[in-house]
Image (spheres, grey):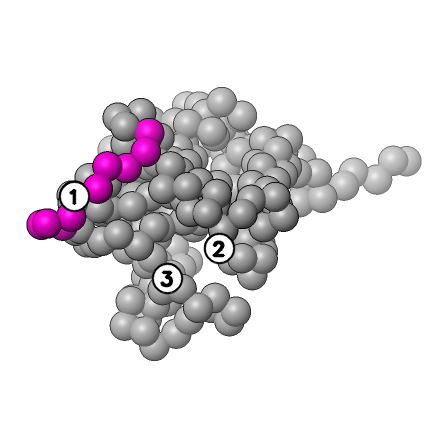
Amino acid sequence: MTRRNEPILNLPGVITGMIAVFVLVHAIRTLMLTPRQDVELLLLFAFIPARYAPAPGLDMVFPGGLPADLWTFVSYGFIHGDLTHLGFNVLWFLPFGSAVARRFGTARFLAFFAATAATGAAMHLLTHDHEFVPMIGASAAISGCMAAAIRFVFELGGPLSVFREADDTAYLVPAAPLSTVLQDGRVIAFLVVWFGVNILFGLGSVGIAGIDQPVAWQAHIGGFLGGLLLFPLFDPVPGAGALDTE
């Protein structure tokens, strides 16, 4: 009899491909680009609030024009500061990104990743007016994946349910309405811990070992809220969750 591998050992192709892109981008930055070229890359692809709301007296034209004004809401998510930053994001992307990718499929997942990266960038822009420091990293979109995952993983027959199938059908259970999900004690506990940790990031009480740059915790929250609220627009599985009503 052939033993069936657990899904965690069989990553969706889109997750493997995106991690490969994360690694490739980082390798190009660290091994191929000069410091000047790296700055040019960040100016073109990182998310910089000053691009959209310049500080008074700052007369600077950012490269890329209007197209870059649009794509940097997403492209920043493929750039990481160092190996620790990259490794930390990949570690979280593997379980949560995989769960959502198995449910959404490749095209929907890529669109969802872009949408939650954008909501994270929008929250960062609202809270960092005029700031010139670039924001990079996939954390906001990964936070969106975490939020999407809690919409279905605890449901009966879902990936974290006691009664589940041994294949990917566990990721295709109907999602409960958001109002019902928010009454689940496991979800509430997850939310308390997740928001608590991000608030501590904001207060400077905790940090990530090996990462000296400030954590863009507002972008995390923006991505998470985007994933939580936009989930029904991307979810292909019919059920009550599609309408978010009782």
Marks 2 & 3, CB-CB < 8 Å contact: no
Q: Amino acid at mark 2?
A: Gly
Q: CA distance from mark 1 to mark 2?
A: 27 Å
Circle 1 packing at 10 Å, graded few (<14), some (14-19), many (20+), is few
Q: Residue furthest right?
A: 1
For badge 1, the amino acid type reads: Asp
Q: Which mark is residue 59?
A: 1
Which element is circle 3 on? loop
Q: Nearer the viewer, residue 68 or 234?
A: 68
Distance CA(mark 3)–CA(mark 1): 28 Å
On the rendered image, what quadrant is the N terminus found in?
A: top right
Give the farthest residue toward the left.
56
Secondary-structure class at tag 2: loop
What is the magenta segment's predominant secondary structure? loop
The residue sitting at 32% across, 58% down in the picture is 217
Q: x, y percentage for residue 124?
A: 26, 50
Q: Which mark is residue 215?
A: 3
> In the figure, is residue 182 to the left or right of 210?
left
Magenta-colored span: 55-64
Q: Nearer the viewer, mark 1 or mark 2?
A: 1
Q: Residue at x 39, y 74 (%)?
A: 206
Q: Is residue 198 above or below residue 164?
A: below
